[in-house]
Each structure stands twice: as C-alpha cells, then as structure tokens.
Image (spheres, rainbow, N blue to C red):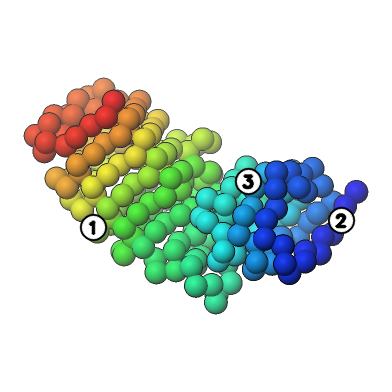
Amino acid sequence: NLVSVKFGEKITSIGLCAFGYCEGLTGTLELPETVTDLNSDAFYDTNYTKFKVLDGLTPNSIISQVRYSNMELEVDENSEKYKMVDNILFSKDGKILYYAGKGDFTDYVVPDGVIQIWDSAFSEVKSMNGKLTLNEGLQQIGSRAFYSYSCDGFSGDLIIPDSVILIGNYAFYNSDNFTSIRIGSGVTSLESNVFCNVPDDIFIKMCRDILDNGTSTEG
C-alpha cells in the first residue's frame, strides 16, 4: 500500500483517481506550485488530513479536494490569492468568502469587505445556530451558499442588505428556522428555490416585499 509520494517539480496536472483509495497516504498533501489542473477525485479516499493551497489552483479545485474528506485547508501566509481567517477560506483581499470549512457557527457575522459568498460556501459546516448577519456591501450570494447537507440553518431575522444584487439557486434551501426574511431593495435577481421550504407565512410576507421592490425572480 502506497505510504508516500514525491511529486516532480514539472508536474502540472493530476487526473481522476490518480491516487484514489491509497489509504496509506497521511499527513499534509503538498503539491508543487506548478500544478494548475487537479481533478476533484485525484486523492479520493486517502487519509491526508491537510491540503496546502496552491495559488495556481482555482477555488473550486481547492474546495473539491477537502469536500467529503477528512482534509482541512492550509494556506501559506505568502499566498498572493488566498488567506485563511478562523478556518475560513477567503480571497487574499477579503472580498470573496470561498469556503467555510466544517466547523460550528453561532451568530455568524460576515466580515466587512466581503462582496461575494461562493457557491456552497457553508455546505459542509457541522452546525449553524443563532443569527446570520450579512454585511452591507455584500453583492452576491452564491448557489447553495447556506444550504448545509448535514445540519439545520441559521435562525432569527434574516436581512438581505440593500447592496445585494443576486441570490443564487437554493442559497437558503431548507432554512426553515428563520422567523422573518427581509429582501433588500437592491436585489434584481432571485434564482430558483432560493428560500424553498421556509415556513409559509414567512414566505408569503417575503414574496409581497419582493413584489413591492420589483425584484426579478426565476422559479
């Protein structure tokens, strides 16, 4: 059973299941900076516990390595594209929240300066309790951003700031713990099933507000 790998400095691509099911691989997965193409299942079912982020990889390539695995992300402080703050992956300038990891969140406040929450950013968190506060200045909430596959969503009053323009598909799907939802006046597009399965009375009130604001909806 393979227990270690030494990667050559000229390697640029690692394909589907290249090291899949190599359960003897443990510790930190460190790839050469030359790697720019990494299949989502390249290290499927290994026992690495950390993945060192490369600037040459796209956010989706990075996230796919740790999703549904035991790995956590590690970002070098000298990275020019990414940074970690409280175990959350952000763009270096703090404008994009890419991946919230697998922790517990209580009364979470999206940091000032964030303008975009990535698709499925909170899909793997262990718990979302209490109030979610979205920052003024936020512009886009990605598809399934706050739809967790393993826990209930945030609760209390959800206020979508006036700065938000777009909310993606299923962004708050199954978030049935909210007591009220206010859609900001800046929203111009709600994609399909954004608030699917929220309580009927809250949904009806929200829809009336949307119609008053002239917001575009899809599905």
Mark in front: 2 vs 3: 3
Q: Is residue 93 left or right of residue 205?
A: right
Q: Which residue is mark 3?
A: 40
Check contact, mark 1 vs mark 2: CB within 8 A: no
Say which residue label 1 marks: 136
Residue at image point 76% right, 60% down: 27
Give amino acid for label 1: Glu
Does residue 6 lie above or below 209 as drawn? below
Q: Is residue 16 above or below residue 25?
A: above
Provide residue 155's location: percent of width, then percent of height: 34, 40
Amino acid on which disc 2 is placed: Val
Q: Residue at x 35, y 25 (%)?
A: 197
Q: Is residue 109 visible?
A: no
In the rendered structure, find residue 67 and report the number of the disc placed on it: none
Residue 206: image x %, image y %? Answer: 19, 32
At x 84% / y 59%, what residue is drawn? 4
Report x, y in % for residue 109: 35, 56
- Secondary structure under tag 3 reads loop
Q: Amino acid at mark 3?
A: Ser
What is the number of callouts on the image?
3
Specify which label sits upstream in the sequence, 2 or 3. 2
Whole-number angstrom distance, CA of label 3 to CA of label 1: 34 Å
Residue farthest to the top, as pictured: 200
